Image (cartoon, helix red, strand yellow):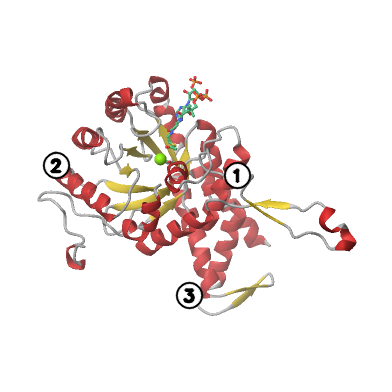
Amino acid sequence: MRSAKDFFRPLAVGAPAPVREVPLRPSRMIHFFDPGNEKMAAKVPSLAPQVDVLLGNLEDAVPADRKEAARLGLVKTARATDFGDTQLWTRINSLDSPWVLDDLLTLVPEIGDKLDVVMVPKVEGAQDIHYVDRLLAQLEAKAGLGRPILVHAILETATGVANVEEIAGASPRMQGISLGPADLAASRRMKTTRVGGGHPGYLVRADPAPAADGGADAPRPTFQQDLWHYTIARMVDACAAHGILPYYGPFGDIQDVTACEDQFRNAFLLGCVGAWSLHPAQIAIAKRVFSPSPQDVAWARRVIAAMGDGTGAVMIDGKMQDDATYKQCLVVADLADALAARDPELAEVYAAATREEDAR
Ligand SMILES: CC(=O)SCCNC(=O)CCNC(=O)[C@H](O)C(C)(C)COP(=O)(O)OP(=O)(O)OC[C@H]1O[C@@H](n2cnc3c(N)ncnc32)[C@H](O)[C@@H]1OP(=O)(O)O
Ligand SMILES: O=CC(=O)O
Ligand SMILES: [Mg+2]
């Protein structure tokens, strides 16, 4: 482990200084596209203003014989596109694959000035982040980049989950972590065949009814449980403890927009700031879910105003507010401010709801 005093030193002579705080840029949806798929890549300029993050995917879902085409397609798309204030990320191939070295050796010199974040799949421990950290520093120095490229880990192996705290704190370059439910299910030998979401067999059943209500013959309701609660909660704690951002990952049933929205909202409520969109249909869902509701924003702003310096206790509409609810409200209001700064329509919706709340 690096000593505390060396933690923020560049890992290569001439590399940019590491960031001391993760920039809180909106990232409600990380929109995946295959840069080697010409039809998808052609949509990037029109998608850029609609999403917070565009991610050129080089790993799973890109066939082995199209890896090079995807890498070169990303270089071409990045060079040709004005992303405005939309972030550009990439997901490189896994660290044990035959492609990852060329991914980094190509992307950093060619488009390192446009890349905000490199997503690293199948991270198992701090050693994986340290490897990427040093290599990126060397490549940044060689390319003369003025700011560091950040690193995002996918939590998708049992070993990765066991080591999630050390992964989150492995480098000042760490921007965040996403849950990868598909690979994680395989790694854990779970008996699912889906990408995220629930399973009808994972449930609890109500006790048998009393004899007066039909006893053992009466139907016993069942309640589907959340397969991902434990891992998301653990990931959120690890991220929060290290000042980085947690994300839900992919939801593979593109047509089931209702279950997708539920999965995203559970993650949002537990502390995640965004999720992946795999298809254009999922962009609006993520935008809706990961933007706090206008009512919640108006309420949060009202509590903050009423709490003055944030200490003590007040009563609003019959509900006790104190230092702790003030802090919760700051989370909502600060997120709303960051989103409103990027999205004038949302800013107006939040302002209107706040005026309404103030007039009550
Ligand atoms: C477990 C994991 O690792 S998840 C991450 C890896 N997976 C991915 O990145 C998958 C990304 N998404 C996709 O590949 C595709 O959306 C698929 C395969 C799921 C579905 O693709 P299609 O069958 O073409 O879907 P559909 O017919 O509904 O597409 C409608 C249009 O949207 C386009 N489109 C689909 N997905 C995307 C996307 N992610 N980005 C941009 N455009 C897209 C299609 O090209 C099509 O364009 P067209 O109208 O000009 O023909
Ligand atoms: O990469 C994502 C996953 O779910 O696996
Ligand atoms: Mg995966």
Give the residue displayed 43% in from the left and 53% down from the top: 246
User: Do tag 1 and tag 2 residues touch (Cβ < 8 Å)?
Assistant: no
Determine whether 152 is above or below 167 in the image.
above
Q: Are marks 1 and 3 in contact (CB under 8 Å)?
A: no
User: Counting other residues with Cα less than 10 Å from the Cα at mark 1, is it few (<14), some (14-19), or many (20 or more)?
Assistant: some
Residue 145 in the figure: left or right of residue 241: left
Q: Amino acid at mark 3?
A: Asp
Going by the numbered disc 2, the residue's amino acid type is Gly
Mark 2 residue element: loop
Q: Give the residue at x 55% y 56%.
A: 269
Q: Taking 114 as reference, is 252 left or right? A: right
Q: Which residue is mark 2?
A: 144
Which residue: 35% across, 58% down?
Answer: 163
- From the viewer's perspective, is the residue at label 3 or at label 2 nearer? 2
In the rendered image, which residue does mark 3 sit on? 309
Residue 348 shows in this picture: no
